[in-house]
Structures are given as structure tokens and as C-alpha cells.
Image (cartoon, coloured by chain):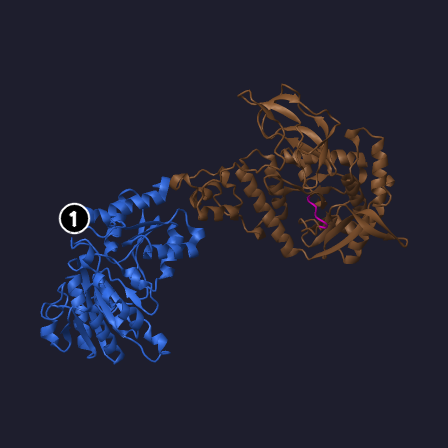
Amino acid sequence: MPSLGADMDAGTLVEWHVAAGDAVKRGDIVAVVETDKGLVDIEIWESGVVDALLVAPGSKVPVGTLLATTRTDGARAQAAQPPVLPPPPRPPLRPMASPAAKQLARERGVDLAAVHGTGPHGAITRADVEHVTPSPAPPPEKAEARRERVEEVETPREPRPAVLDATAMRRAIAASMARSKREIPHYYLSADIDLSRSTAWLEAENARRPVEERLLLAALLLKATALAARAVPEVNGFFVDGVFRPSSAVHLGVAVSLRQGGLVAPAIHDVDARTVVEVQASLRDLVGRVRTGRLRSSEMSDPTLTVTNLGEQGVAAVFGVIYPPQVALVGLGKPLERPWASGGMLGVRPVVTATISADHRVSDGHRGALFLAALDGWMQKPEAL
Amino acid sequence: MNGAPAVKVTYREAVRAAMREAMQRDARVFLMGEDVGRYGGTYACSLGLLDEFGPERVRDTPLSEGAFVGVGIGAAIGGMRPIVEIMTVNFSLLALDQILNNAATLRHMSGGQVGVPLVLRMATGAGRQVAAQHSHSLENYYAHIPGLKVLAPATVEDARGMLWTALLDPDPVILFEHATLYGTEGELAEDAGAVPIDRAAVRRAGRDVTVVGYGGTVAKALEAARMLAERGIDAEVIDLRTLRPLDDETLVASVRKTRRAVLVDEGWKTGSLAGEICARLVERAFYDLDAPIARVCTEEVPIPYPKHLEDAALPQPGRIVEAVLATVGGRG
């Protein structure tokens, strides 16, 4: 059982994607584990053949428990689980590269592990890095907003070499975020939202559901965000050519970070019109496919509002940078038990800090505040979501 | 160049012409040292000057470097512009106390009241089978000392032009003349004169690697560059000219362009000027480097007497080529 977070002591094996005798290769998703934070796909870090599955679905086991064994070609049985700490993404030996090459690789987001070195003792030189990324990024001013978006979202879909993926993505993120901070007058609001009703409702609801259909807080928050956006349309849509174009549909972009660095924010369509169960299914499906690089193009186009959730990383609150031409970004922190005064009484309640970064050209703080209030309101009546 | 016709002169003749011009232009200038008068100089640099300027201005001294360098310092403090010749840098160590504790220090210790406008000329370097006590390259000893300027003319233009600029300096200046250069010939404009002493010179422009030399190693670096060109490697050769203060800008600009540096220094590698230059390049151009900086220095032995061992101990074009090839790596 891998540690999927610093505070994780145990996890529940929800399902196996493989059986004894199956051939697996490094990076395959072999199992799904449920943690306090949700369902997580477990990748395997060794190629070989599954020897035996040692933990049955539904079992909750401590971090470090042997989940399965695999045989490699040498017929040596090995633990299938990844190391307790997430393994480094690179091979243990750093590629030898000159300072000039490293500098350029940093500037262009090139992974040196994928560059062929022609310098002394095979070291990577600046010219070798230039060979991989022949031209510097175009100035962001010249790139159309839509093109930037397409450039970013196409990257993970196409089976190009990893080095190009990371480069193009970093470049697109750089162009887009720089443009955002240059053009969009952001304002930022935050509100602490009492989650006790939502979590109580989830507990009751999940008690009568089979494990694989259990609902997660994240799905509730997404649905509530979509409904709040419908109530305050100034946060949902695009600012194009000096004009705000509100969107009648709410397509929530969900920011998902990639293991190799960078992030994508594919859309879950029509979140306001879907059930929580459907939203959760979409979310789980989406995250799984983002991590394995199998996104659908429809998901990559036109999120009308983006949600970033850094709660899994333990962040209390996130004030994000709006993704142009969108006009707002909703940030969710880690749900924590906090002292909470209500009705003259002090109690301990689960609380999340929700934020909104919004475009002051389109809306004012008052409207942003209404959005957060609407989000809060929906989280207080989860049964209506 | 200014268009004046060029003539072939030896380095020795250029040094002599520089001293003659200095004594003609400024009555305060005089030459002092061992055998500089009747014998005409150990390397014949001052041949004929005694007859031309007389024993007051071309003075033979006893074999006591500490004494005559001290006399030179006193004369400089007293308003003269002495040129003091020391036979080799090995012997200059006898005068190191005068040079470091007096010449380089008095302006500082007198709060600026006492300057020492002294010019010291001395031969340096190996290659003539005169064995360990006459062959070392100790320029770095002097380049270490604040208060001194240290020059290394490698061409006939610099041999001709650096002396006058040095005499104009209000503080002590040391000129190192590599002993193998005296007999070398070069083209010199008939009206050649003073040259700046604050910049290094790019003696050969190139793209692929910067080879740095000074004094006796410049010609070797240029020969190496010629050999490298046959293999398609375009080396830039920099002549330091001034060893203190070092011209960081020229060095850094070149390495920013070529991304590689090979430093050639006839001093021993440990504690060498090449080590100092390496450190400066790492400090100022680290992120421009595409290969470790290489040094081609003298083997860490007293310079041997037998020719084959002396040759083996010194930086040679072949060793410079090898160092460049290792630095350039697979692309060469």
C-alpha cells in the first residue's frame, strides 16, 4: 500500500485491474485505492507478470502492506507496490549536462533525461538542447488566446516524446498565465464554508451505497460550484475582444496536475445539469485519463469556469490565476476540522476555504461575494444538489 | 593600423626602440640593471644605449637585486622614471621584499602622498635549456599583489608600445618578457608607438573554444588553433597582455560566445594564473559553459635541463590541441 500523502496511514483496496498471470508494464494502473481524499489509481513501477494478489478488494490495510507480487523475466518474485514514498520520476543517475545546457533546458522546460548528449564524455551541451527545441517560445502577445488553449490541451493527447510534451505545455502555461496577469485585473475573495451538513449527508448516503458508488466531497463541491455559477453568470463565460460573453452552460474545467509536471484543466460538461453521481463518475474518469494521457478533445475545449483544488496537498486556501479568456477561477483548499462558532456555541466542524479570483472588468467584488455565498448555500443543502 | 609602412623587427629590437624613445622623450627616464650597459644587456636589449645616452642614464649595477630595485624605488619616489631590468624572474625573488613591501605598498601606507612610478622589466620562462634556476614562470607571484600592474607583451607591437604607457603610470608596473620571444620577428609599423595596457586582445577570432594564453604561450596557442582548424574546430585565441588587473570583460565575452575555455599558462598549475582565470570564468560565466574549463600548464617539476624533458614539461601546441578536443567532445 503506497503512501499517497504525508498524512495517510492506511488505504482501502477498492478493486484490482489485474489478475494473477497478467503481464504488466511500468506505468500500468493495476488497482484502485480509496483514501480519505478519494479514489486513487495505483500505478505499477516494475514490468513483469503478476504473481499473486495478496489483498482482497474491500480490505483496509496500513501503508507499507504488500499488495501483490510480480515476476520479472528473471522469475524473481517482487513486491508489486511502489516504494512507500513516491519514487523519483527520473532514473537515479542525473544526466550529465553542461551548465549552459541546464540553463537552457530550464528556460525551455526540457527534460534532460530525454536529450542525447554529444559533449565531452557524452555530456549534454547547449546545442543538444537547442536541437530538441529548435525555436524559443513565441511572444505571448502574438499568440491568440484560443491557440494557446489548444496548444496546451493537445499536448497530453498526442503521443509525442515526453520531452516535447513538457516543453510545449510549460510554454503554453507560461504564455497563458503571463497574459492573464498582464491583462486581467484580478480581485480575490475567500469564504470559509461549514461542511458539516454536507459531510453528514455524504456519510448517510454512502452507508447505503456499494463501495464503488460512494460519493466524494469533491463531487458535491463541483456541483455546488456549477449551481452557484448559474446564479452569478458574471463568473461563467469568456472575455473576448473587450466584451464579456456569458455562457448559458456551465462547463467546469478541473485543474489536474501531471506527474511529469505541468497541468491540464479539462472540462466536465454541463455540471449544473448533472446529478452528483454523474459528476463524480465524470471526475473520476477524467482524472484517470488525464494521468494516463487519454483525454478527449471535447473535454479540452471551452471550460467556462475553472476549479482548482489543492486540498490534497494540504493547502488551506488557493488564490488562482484566471485562465484566459475565462473570467474567474474557483479555488478549494483542504477540508479541515476547525473551531466554529454558530448560534452562540463553539463547536468543531469540517470547514473548507473557498476562494474566487475574478476579472474586475466583468464583475465587482459584490458579485464575487454573491457567488461564494451561493456556493456556501448549496453546501448547506446537499440533498438538493 | 594607421597605414604607415610595416617593417620586420625582432622583439629585442622593439624593446630597445621602446627604451630609446622613452629616454629621448623624458629626461627623467633612465635604465638600470645587471650588465645593461657595457655588455648591452643579458638579452642584448640595451645594446648601443650606453653609447647613445651615457653612463648616467644607462647604469650597470652590482649583482644585488634587492639593492638596485630598492635604488629604483627611491629614484621613482624622488621624481625619476626608472626602468629597472632584472635578468630573470627567478632572481627577482631577491627583490620581492622591495617590490611587495615598498613599491606596491607605499602609496597605500602614505595615504596617497608617496607614489612609486617604477617600471621593472624582467625575462621569464623556459625553453632555452638554461635549467631550473633561470627558467621559471612566476608572473602569478606578482599578479597576486595589489598595487602592481603586471604586463606580458607577447608581440612586437606590445614590446614596442607597452613600455611608454607603463612609464606614464603613477604606480609600479612590471613587464614580463618571455625569453624565447627576444629573437622572434614580427611586422611593426614604422611609426608604432604606445599601446593601451588595460585590455586583453583577441589574436584570432573563433566560434568553438576560447584558448587563453599570454607571453610565451600566445604563439603556441595560435599554432594549436591552426592545427585545430584543420580538424574543423574554430578556436578563438586571447592574449591576456595584462596579467593584473585581468580583463574579465574580454574573457567573459569570448567564453559567452564559445562556451568552452582552455587556459594555457607556463606557470605550474597549482595556484596558477590559469586557476584564477578559471575561477573568474566560473563566477561570471558559469551558465554559459558547455564543458569543464581545461588548463594546460607546466608540469609540476623544476624546469628540467635536457631538451626532451624541458619540452615535455612545458605547454606545447599538441597538448593544447588535446585539451581542446577533450573540451569540445563529440562534436569535434
**Letter of the brown chain:** A
Work out whether B141 lies above or below A269. below
Amino acid carrying label 1: it is Lys
Percent x, y for residue A26?
58, 29
Residue displayed at 76% across by 35% down: A280
Which element is circle 1 on?
helix
Percent x, y for residue B118?
26, 73
Q: In the image, is residue A316 part of the stretch drawn in magenta?
A: yes
Residue A15: name its quadrant: top right
Span highlighted in magenta in the image: A313-317
Q: Residues within 10 Å of mark 1 (few under 14, many from 20)?
A: some
Percent x, y for residue A43?
63, 31
Percent x, y for residue B232?
30, 43
Quadrant for the C terminus of chain A, please.
top right
- What secondary structure prevails in the magenta region? loop
Could you tell whether A93 is left or right of A275 in the image? left
Could you tell whether B249 is left or right of B190 in the image? right
Residue displayed at 73% across by 39% down: A37
Q: In the image, is residue B45 part of the stretch drawn in magenta?
A: no
Q: Chain of mark 1?
A: B
User: How many numbered circles are shown?
Assistant: 1
Would residue B177 be visible to someone looking at this image? no
Chain B tint as drawn: blue
Q: Which residue is mark 1?
A: B307
Please tell me which residue lies in front, A150 or B265: B265
